[in-house]
């Protein structure tokens, strides 16, 4: 049990939790100055103003809690990163050099690089080694303030290796304090042997991969890279119809490379989120309005690939919610630093600090189906929080984009050692 007291500001507090925040409400953020926070049995027990603490709790009760003095520091709910690919083998820095020299993402993919390169490396890597590599990345993102993460497969591209990836994700669920959701992304790219007969690979996903994923209970979601040069709307429709029979809700890679129809097919299938969204127009915004689908922007990928920026302000002004996730992966966003994602949201997408806080906590929690469990400071939610170093205000978090401002991390009510992370 932990009592955090004398908190300069307790950020993202909720008495009556909401599923997300949208439109003009994204620039609103509930905070409590000079606050306390009680954590018990892995959950948030109570919070409020410091002057209320000793009115509500006797010294005898409080003596049972470990006390942390947060004077001059702010307490945030842990980041929720709703789109990552952090189970992968090796790295792809040579392609990074190719990008510097002017090759596009699509050109690298056509040469057998990109996702296919990661698939080749993964096939050569044991399940144990794959877990060890991913575990190191998990420790890194924990130290950077992330408390919940979605992890996709998609570097297997055959039944054996897709299942291998999903088993690694399952083991990470069982051996870390992070809240983890697994996403089956067999439709990440078309393997070289299926080029020119893409429909046969879709058949393999539907008839062989999906039934085994479901039988072994290895995935929470299903994903498709519905975009130019990858999977078509028709492919996506077939895969999602099949996945629905197994109760797997979609989360779609959409409109990163062009106006692909990925947003519309995602909304049609009640996708939890549609992600990337570099190419968004009035039709896509209209489809998303009044849907249950969270538009999710991945600033790290657009930055790393030097791509057009998603029109975040236009979407917010239309009344949509926005989520921001890291897309941590070896080819297009080799970073899981959600604080940096906040900074990119402010600098590149012109979001306010309050908007990016909402976009990396409560809205990403919804994009993982976890809005009832994490993403804000609310009684009964998971005790996943971080304490900043001494900083003047919450705006300083995205402002100081290159500084590590996290002093302590608490997951499931347990303080984590940042040196071991």
Image (cartoon, rainbow, N blue to C red):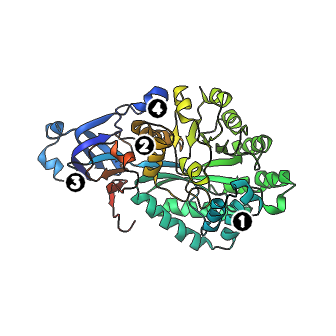
Which of the pair 25/342 is nearer the observer? 342
In terms of sequence position, does the residue under pointer 1 or pointer 4 come before the other?
4
* Label 2, residues with CA under 10 Å away: few <14, some 14-19, many ≥20: many
Element under disc 2: loop
In terms of sequence position, does the residue under pointer 1 or pointer 2 come before the other?
1
In terms of sequence position, does the residue under pointer 3 or pointer 4 come before the other?
4
Tell me where residue 331 sits by quadrant: bottom right
Rendered view: 391 above or below 271: below
Q: Which residue is mark 1?
A: 160
Image point 59% across, 62% down: which residue?
330
Q: How far is mark 1 from mark 4, CA to CA? A: 40 Å
* Residue 375, label in figure: 2
Look at discs 1 and 3 and give the one toward the viewer: 3
Rendered view: 106 above or below 175: above
In the rendered view, does 242 fall on the left or right side of 291?
right
> Can the viewer see residue 370 in this picture?
no
> Can the viewer see residue 310 in this picture?
yes
* Residue 68, label in figure: 3
Element under disc 1: helix
Q: Which residue is mark 4?
A: 21
* Label 3, residues with CA under 10 Å away: few <14, some 14-19, many ≥20: some
Q: How far is mark 1 from mark 2, CA to CA? A: 34 Å
Element under disc 4: loop
Look at discs 1 and 4 and give the one toward the viewer: 4
Image point 14% across, 40% down: which residue?
54
Q: How far is mark 4 from mark 2, CA to CA? A: 11 Å
């Amino acid at each position: 049990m932990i009592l955090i007291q004398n908190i300069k500001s307790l950020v993202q507090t909720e008495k009556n939790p909401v599923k997300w925040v949208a439109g003009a409400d994204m620039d609103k953020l509930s905070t409590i100055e000079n606050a306390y926070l009680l954590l018990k049995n892995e959950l948030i027990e109570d919070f409020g103003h410091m002057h209320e603490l000793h009115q509500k709790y006797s010294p005898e009760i409080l003596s049972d809690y470990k006390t942390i003095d947060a004077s001059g520091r702010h307490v945030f709910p842990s980041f929720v990163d709703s789109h990552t690919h952090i189970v992968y083998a090796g790295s792809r820095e040579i392609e990074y050099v190719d990008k510097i020299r002017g090759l596009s993402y699509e050109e690298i993919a056509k040469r057998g690089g990109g996702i296919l390169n990661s698939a080749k490396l993964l096939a050569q890597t044991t399940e144990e080694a794959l877990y060890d590599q991913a575990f190191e990345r998990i420790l890194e993102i924990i130290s950077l303030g992330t408390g919940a993460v979605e992890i996709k497969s998609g570097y297997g591209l055959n039944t054996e290796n897709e299942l291998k990836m999903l088993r690694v994700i399952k083991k990470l669920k069982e051996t870390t304090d992070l809240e983890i959701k697994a996403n089956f992304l067999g439709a990440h790219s078309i393997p070289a042997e299926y080029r020119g007969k893409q429909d046969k690979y879709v058949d393999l996903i539907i008839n062989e991969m999906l039934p085994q994923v479901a039988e072994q209970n290895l995935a929470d979601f299903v994903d498709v890279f519905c975009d130019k040069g990858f999977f078509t709307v028709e492919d996506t429709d077939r895969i999602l119809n099949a996945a629905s029979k197994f109760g797997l809700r979609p989360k779609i890679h959409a409109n990163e490379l062009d106006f692909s129809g990925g947003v519309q097919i995602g909304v049609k299938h009640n996708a939890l989120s549609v992600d990337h969204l570099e190419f968004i127009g009035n039709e896509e915004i209209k489809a998303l309005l009044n849907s249950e689908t969270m538009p999710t922007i991945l600033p790290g990928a657009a930055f790393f690939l030097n791509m057009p920026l998603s029109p975040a302000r236009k979407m917010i002004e239309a009344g949509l919610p926005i989520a921001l996730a890291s897309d941590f992966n070896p080819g297009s966003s080799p970073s899981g630093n959600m604080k940096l994602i906040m900074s990119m949201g402010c600098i590149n997408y012109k979001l306010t600090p309050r908007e990016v806080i909402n976009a990396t906590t409560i809205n990403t929690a919804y994009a993982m189906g976890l809005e009832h469990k994490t993403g804000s400071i609310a009684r009964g939610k998971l005790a996943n929080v971080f304490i900043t170093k001494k900083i003047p205000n919450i705006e300083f978090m995205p402002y100081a984009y290159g500084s590590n401002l996290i002093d302590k991390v608490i997951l499931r009510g347990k303080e984590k050692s940042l040196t071991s992370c």
